[in-house]
Every structure is written in structure tokens, then in C-alpha cells.
């Protein structure tokens, strides 16, 4: 039986080529870096602003942390869920959810996914009027929902910011996250959601205006240096 021996020079060159290929692959792969952590949402978002103040609410909101992902894949590092009341007795539920690292497979939950996952049906969904915020030339695009669960109705107004972009639709968000990754960055993301329980669908128009005004006042009440956690 003839023995096959690889010359030392050939094997050394092959090993060198493999090392060089590994080094080039490492250089070609972006080294991802997450953006700096956000300030505490709990401390930054005021408990009272304008005519609104936070109160205890015995009724639970739709949980921003429940959705399609498993517990180990939750996209959020901070969440705040409160109920505010004004002098007219109007109640608005606020949900904020921020994640430092938005990835292709784990990113901010859209309410139209979260609500059905918790027993609600989406009666209507539409891109609503953008909201003009203090100190921002470009208004913030928002989405409005009307949901229903066992006869009770809930109106929702929200926006999602991922990095410098708004909108949480699958393809647009994935493409943006991919481009950021190729540039070596992992964008953060936040869901800003207001909601109101309704007695009938006749209250939808008034509710959406109330929530729009509430969200504008909320952002204006956050100290200027911290507003970029909510808006771009």
C-alpha cells in the first residue's frame, strides 16, 4: 500500500492560506456596537404634567412584554405602564417599552400583534395624522387602532422608533436593522403607546384626539436632553 505524504512546504502554505482567509473574514464582518443605554424611563417620564397626573388603576393594560417571542427573546430592557387622569375625568393608559438592541428576529412588538396575542381582535387599523412635537421640524408618524375583547372596546394610538427611523412594519424595519448592522451599529428601539377604554365606537374620534394631545404634552414634559429616547 503506497503512503501518501503531503510535503511540508505545501502543508505550511495551506495553513497560512487558511489563517489569512480567517483574518480577512474577520475584517469583513462588522463589529457590532449597541448604542449607549437610555436614562431610566421610570424617572425621566413625569408622573404629572399639564392637566394630567398618574393614578393607580386596578384594570390591567395589555402587556407590552407578551407577544410572539419567548421570555428569553424579549426585546425590552425597560418598560413603564401607567394610567393618567385629567381634571375632566378622562383616563389615558400609557405604555412605554425600550430595548437597547433591536435585531432581525427580536424587535419592538407592534400593538396589532400584541393585542390579538392577548385575546383582542383588531376592528380597524390606519396610519393616523403625524404629531408635531416641540423642537422637531418633522412630525412623528402615528398609527391608530380600534380593538375589541368580549364586548369591551379599546382605542390605541402609538408610534415605534427604531434607531433614527419610525415605523415597525416587518420589511422596512428589517432592512433598516440590516443596514445598521452592516455599518457596525445595533439600533435601539421604543414603543410609545396610549390607549383608552371606550363604551362605544361613537367615542373613537374624540378618543384619538385626546390621546394625540396627551402624547404631545407627554413628550414636551420630558426634559429636552432625554426626549430622543421617545422621538428622533
Image (tube, helix red, strand yellow):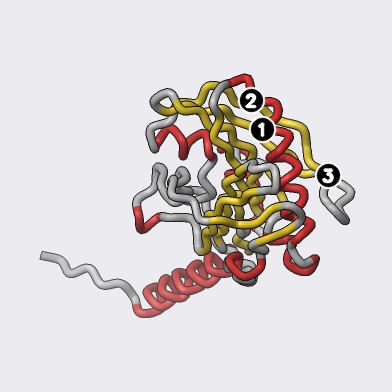
Q: From the viewer's perspective, is residue 8 above or below residue 207?
A: below
What count of labels does the image hold? 3
Specify whether residue 232 is in view.
Answer: no
Disc 3 secondary structure class: loop
Q: Residues within 10 Å of mark 3 (few under 14, many from 20)?
A: some
Whether label 2 touches label 1, CB < 8 Å = yes
Residue located 58% across and 44% down the image: 174
Badge nearest the viewer, 3 or 2: 2
In the picture, the disc for residue 78 is none
| Gap in angstroms between the C-alphas marked 3 and 1 | 18 Å
Name the element at disc 1. helix
Q: Earlier in the sequence, mark 3 or mark 2?
A: 3
Identify the residue at horizontal 53%, vertical 22% (top origin).
Answer: 123
Which residue is tagged 2?
A: 203
Q: Residue 163's x, y, as percent? A: 67, 55
Instruction: Identify the mark nearer the N-term, 3 or 1.
Output: 3
Residue found 22% across the figure and 68% down from its top: 4
Q: Which mark, by number, is residue 132?
A: 3
Residue 113, given in percent of the width and then of the height, sits at 48, 36
Nearer to us: label 3 or label 1: 1
Mark 1, residue position: 207
What is the CA distance from the residue labelled 3 to the residue labelled 2? 23 Å
| Left or right, 123 with reference to 172 | left
Amino acid at each position: 500500500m503506497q503512503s501518501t505524504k503531503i510535503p511540508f512546504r505545501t502543508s505550511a502554505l495551506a495553513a497560512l492560506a487558511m489563517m489569512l482567509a480567517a483574518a480577512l473574514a474577520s475584517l469583513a464582518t462588522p463589529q457590532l456596537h449597541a448604542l449607549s443605554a437610555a436614562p431610566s424611563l421610570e424617572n425621566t417620564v413625569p408622573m404629572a404634567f399639564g392637566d394630567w397626573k398618574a393614578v393607580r388603576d386596578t384594570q390591567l393594560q395589555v402587556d407590552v412584554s407578551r407577544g410572539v417571542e419567548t421570555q428569553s427573546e424579549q426585546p425590552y430592557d425597560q418598560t413603564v405602564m401607567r394610567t393618567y387622569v385629567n381634571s375632566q375625568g378622562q383616563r389615558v393608559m400609557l405604555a412605554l417599552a425600550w430595548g437597547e438592541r433591536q435585531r432581525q428576529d427580536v424587535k419592538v412588538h407592534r400593538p396589532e400583534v400584541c393585542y390579538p396575542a392577548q385575546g383582542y381582535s383588531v376592528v380597524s387599523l390606519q396610519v393616523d395624522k403625524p404629531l408635531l412635537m416641540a423642537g422637531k421640524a418633522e412630525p412623528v408618524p402615528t398609527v391608530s387602532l380600534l380593538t375589541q375583547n368580549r364586548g369591551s372596546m379599546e382605542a390605541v394610538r402609538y408610534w415605534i422608533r427604531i434607531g433614527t427611523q419610525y415605523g415597525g412594519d416587518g420589511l422596512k424595519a428589517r432592512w433598516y436593522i440590516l443596514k445598521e448592522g452592516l455599518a457596525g451599529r445595533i439600533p435601539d428601539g421604543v414603543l410609545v403607546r396610549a390607549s383608552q377604554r371606550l363604551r362605544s365606537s361613537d367615542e373613537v374620534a374624540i378618543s384619538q384626539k385626546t390621546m394625540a394631545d396627551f402624547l404631545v404634552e407627554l413628550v414636551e414634559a420630558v426634559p429636552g436632553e432625554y426626549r430622543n429616547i421617545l422621538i428622533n
